[in-house]
Amino acid sequence: MLLMLAEPGMPLDRAVSFRRSVAGAESNVAQGLARLGHWARWIGRVGDDPAGEAVMRELRADGVDVSCAEMDPEAPTGLLLRDSHERRPIDVQYYRSGSAASLLAPAHVRAEALEGARVVHVTGITPMLSESAARATWALIQRARDAGAVVSFDPNVRRKLGTDHQWIRTVGPLLREADLVLAGEDELELLLGGGAEEAAKALLNLGRARTVVVKRRDHSAVSMDHDGQWTQRAFEVPVADPVGAGDAFAAGWLSGWLRGLPPERSLAEAACVAALVVQAPSDTDGLPTASARDRALASLTRGGETVHR
């Protein structure tokens, strides 16, 4: 979607100045991985309008492959308005009913779009957009399997998209189809019932999951697989804008997974990328390159010189 971000500290209903940017859970992850040096392709739909052109241009600028994305000549690009506060609750308004993205259907997920992919990442937001988008998500998972790719899933629950029952019915079954799960503690409790740790173990023992990463309410994270579990605390940094932290965490963790890093290092890199993103406005401004991530992680874990000279 096109993101219109109100001037820092100004409530949305009083803001008169907005900064144009781009937002979207899967596209945020794609941008994060591309900046970290990975090849990333975004599959999605925008309108054939100025907002859609801006979205595609920004993704291209970050090195994201958009060759399989579509521009709809009739439906508009989705719009997101929000404000930005350090401590007050953030007001987010979505305008995506009837958007090009909401019209996503299985026919738009072409098998050739997944050729060469090692991991296919999707969130619960996409299937909650519409019934056709839900069918497209299931088609994506099947085509990922056919291509030999691993499926990564983040529920990314957004209450404005549906009731608890709708989330449980639509997104709960998708959790059980994922090879890699990155989910909030509250999301697992909502979608699967019971405690988050018990839900994670159930996914490992009864579902397809190889690894489940649980983002806890205290902002720490735990990675669980059949070999054990590892915990990572959140790094203490000044927060300018908390939105986008989860997608940044996913990009950081997937980067470690793709490089075959041990779980504790992947968690540390994920926490570092998230810590960098929350220190900057918008969902993607703070996404680092690989070298910037490594410098920041060294500083956060070992201290010392904070100025890169």
Image (cartoon, grey):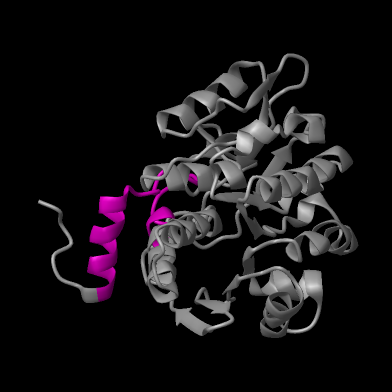
- The answer to which image quadrant residue 70 occupies is top right
Q: Residue at x 80, y 35 (%)?
A: 106
Q: Is residue 149 left or right of residue 298?
A: right
Task: State the quadrant of the N terminus.
Answer: top right
Considering depth in this image, is 108 or 7 the residue closer to the camera? 108
Q: Residue at x 61, y 42 (%)?
A: 24
In the rendered image, residue 122 lying in the magenta stretch gets the answer no
Residue 115 point in image, percent of width and height: 58, 37
Could one spot residue 160 in this view of the protein?
Answer: yes
Q: Residue at x 42, y 67 (%)?
A: 266
Q: Is residue 125 left or right of residue 11?
A: right
Residue 46 point in image, percent of width and height: 67, 26
Considering depth in this image, is 100 or 143 the residue closer to the camera? 143
Could one spot residue 44 in this view of the protein?
Answer: no
Q: Residue at x 83, y 59 (%)?
A: 167
Q: Is residue 309 left or right of residue 109?
A: left
State whether residue 185 is above or below residue 179: below
Considering depth in this image, is 51 or 151 the residue closer to the camera? 151
Number of numbered discs: 0
